[in-house]
Image (cartoon, rainbow, N blue to C red):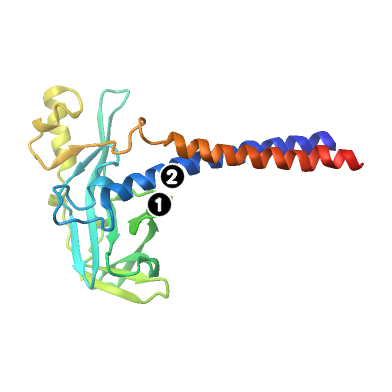
Amino acid sequence: MRIFGRFLYALMAVGIFLLVFTYSIDITANRFYEEVFGASLTDDTDDVPDFYYFYTSIPDYHKSNPIISIDQDGYQIRGYEIATAEINDQEQLVVLEYIYIIVYSDTEDLSLISEISLIEANTEDEFIIPLTKFKTLNILNGVNDKGQIYIPKELFLENDFDKINLIGKDESIITESALNITEYDFTIKQNLESFFQEYDALPDEETIENLQDDLIGVRIIHLDEDNQLNGSVLMVNLAIYFIVLALATYLIFFRRRKYD
């Protein structure tokens, strides 16, 4: 029984170590985004497009102009076309297109918002897209039923949704806006297919300019491996972890044995 208890203690120690390491990475990432954006994620004086550091970091390709662009009652709703692409074992190009949804406000409390509602007025059919906060920043992302930010384009094209609402946690309608999305709004797949037919490859950072649509870009790693972890933050957190671990180990195993 004593051996089993020590085994569980060791597992707990390893688990907490991994949490400390992950927490250190999150702190570094949050500092990076806060330094980039400051108090606002949309700065009219900056050359970087609104929300650039979010939709351009998603694999594998993105389009810079939004398919959904709504500014109403202090809220901004954006939907950017993104796509994953690969050449499979049969040397075939496979492209999956999605919409990356962002909800932002620099004046309103986003903690009161819970979801987006897509509505077809004629039939009153409704589809709910949950929203989740991005780290500690004042920005929300739409997620699918698996908690991922990939909202398939088929959801919009196979339904006649003509209204998009922001829904509060009390189920009240915060904003109500018109919505109009068509197949012609999506251009990444056809551009990648044309490129693949000509070059028998996928475009990268050097060849992306050869696409017909110059609004399409390749994934940008904003927080790369060289700066995704701050060494000083990690050392401080690990020092605290090992001090607490040593103290707990002493109190649980050695001090108790002294009095047994």
Left or right: where does residue 170 sit relative to residue 254? left
Depth check: give the residue in front, 116 or 135.
135
* Image quadrant containing the N terminus: top right
Determine whether the residue tagged by mark 2 lies in a helix, strand or loop. helix
Judge whether 154 appears above or below 241 on screen: below
Q: Position of residue 14 (x, y in %)?
A: 63, 36
Judge whether 166 appears above or below 237 on screen: below
Q: Amino acid at mark 1?
A: Lys
Q: Amino acid at mark 2?
A: Asp
Residue drawn at (32%, 75%) of the image: 173
Residue drawn at (17%, 62%) of the image: 180
Residue drawn at (49%, 40%) of the image: 22
Q: Position of residue 157 (x, y in %)?
A: 22, 55
* Image quadrant containing the C terminus: top right
Q: How many marks?
A: 2
Cα distance between the residues tagged 2 and 1: 8 Å
Depth check: give the residue in front, 92 or 5.
5
The picture quadrant where one finds residue 249 is top right
Mark positioned earlier in the residue sequence (2 or 1) = 2
- Mark sitting on residue 77: none
User: Residues at badges 2 and 1 in contact (C-beta under 8 Å)?
Assistant: yes
- Mark sitting on residue 26: 2
Left or right: where does residue 210 sit relative to residue 246? left
Q: Position of residue 225 (x, y in %)?
A: 36, 31
Q: Position of residue 178 (x, y in %)?
A: 19, 69
Does residue 12 appear in the picture of this structure? Answer: no
Depth check: give the residue in front, 94 or 144.
144
Q: Residues within 10 Å of mark 1 (few under 14, many from 20)?
A: few
Judged from this view, the residue extending furthest toward the left is 212
Q: Residues within 10 Å of mark 2 (few under 14, many from 20)?
A: some
The picture quadrant where one finds residue 62 is top left
Q: Which residue is mark 1?
A: 135
